[in-house]
Image (cartoon, rainbow, N blue to C red):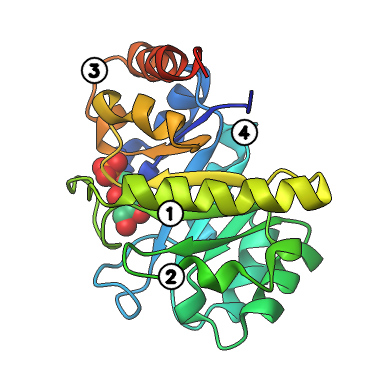
Amino acid sequence: MPEYRIAPSILSADFARLGEEVRNVSEAGASLIHFDVMDNHYVPNLTIGPLVCEAIRPYTDLPIDVHLMVKPVDRIIPDFAKAGANIITFHPEASDHVDRSLSLIREHGCQSGLVFTPATSLDYLDYVLDKVDMVLLMSVNPGFGGQKFIPAMMDKARAARAKLDKYKEQTGRHIALEIDGGVKVDNIGELAAAGVDTFVAGSAIFGHPDYKAIIAEMHRQIALHTQAQ
Ligand SMILES: O=C(CO)[C@H](O)[C@H](O)COP(=O)(O)O
């Protein structure tokens, strides 16, 4: 049984009280803090950078999971590692040299990962799995919180898990599978059954009045859908 992790996306938090929001979701049962970095170039929105990562670092002991939606990729990696990031993921299309970017992340002491937009092929994984700690599937087009889950991503999650399971059979190493976009209590169980173990949720958590209750309900749904497996 994998460890199931809920990663609140602070994109949907109250930015005027960001430290407090990070502390509150950490105390409410989150496993990771998901940190969305958008550059208004690779994606059509502009959000937060290493300065904000450093500012929230004292508010949680949880790993900070930085999702880079930026182009170029490499020059910002050392800055995030220095700012306290623990996991850094990026989009293969945004990197000139995917293998080099993955190595750079690990050289800076962080776990590394590749992110797949809904239309990006999982083939990008084929020659770099040894350098990947987490695969992040986007189930919306990147750029904004609060979008609707794209149903075809359920099959993509199964395909990704099959690829990662095959790799585990060969090497013994588990690679986490994370999903991001439109994750709610009504689809999280099916996603877990499809092989996802790490769930980013922004509006579903920060839009709920009780963070502890919504995270507990997500775990309950996961358990309901995976117990019989
Ligand atoms: O990366 C993102 C958008 O690019 C967000 O993390 C994602 O969409 C989460 O928001 P929500 O749970 O509200 O869909």
Pointer 2 residue: 121
Which residue is depicted at the point 39% across and 42% down?
A: 9
**Residue 62 tag number:** 4
Q: Real-space Cα distance between discs 1 and 4?
A: 21 Å
In the rendered image, the quadrant that contains the N terminus is: top right
Q: If you read the primary sequence from the N terminus, does the residue marked by circle 3 or circle 2 appear first? A: 2
Of labels 1 and 4, the one closer to you? 1
Q: Is residue 41 above or below residue 5?
A: below
Pointer 1 residue: 137
Q: Real-space Cα distance between discs 3 and 4?
A: 22 Å
Quadrant in the rendering for residue 102: bottom right
Count of numbered badges drawn on the protein: 4
Q: Amino acid at mark 1?
A: Leu
Of labels 3 and 2, the one closer to you? 2
Of labels 3 and 1, the one closer to you? 1
Q: Real-space Cα distance between discs 3 and 2?
A: 37 Å
Q: Residue furthest bottom?
A: 96
- Residue 183 x %, y %: 30, 37
- Residue 142 x %, y %: 30, 62
- Residue 83 x %, y %: 64, 56
**What element does badge 3 sit on?**
loop
In the drawing, does residue 225 fall left or right of residue 113? left
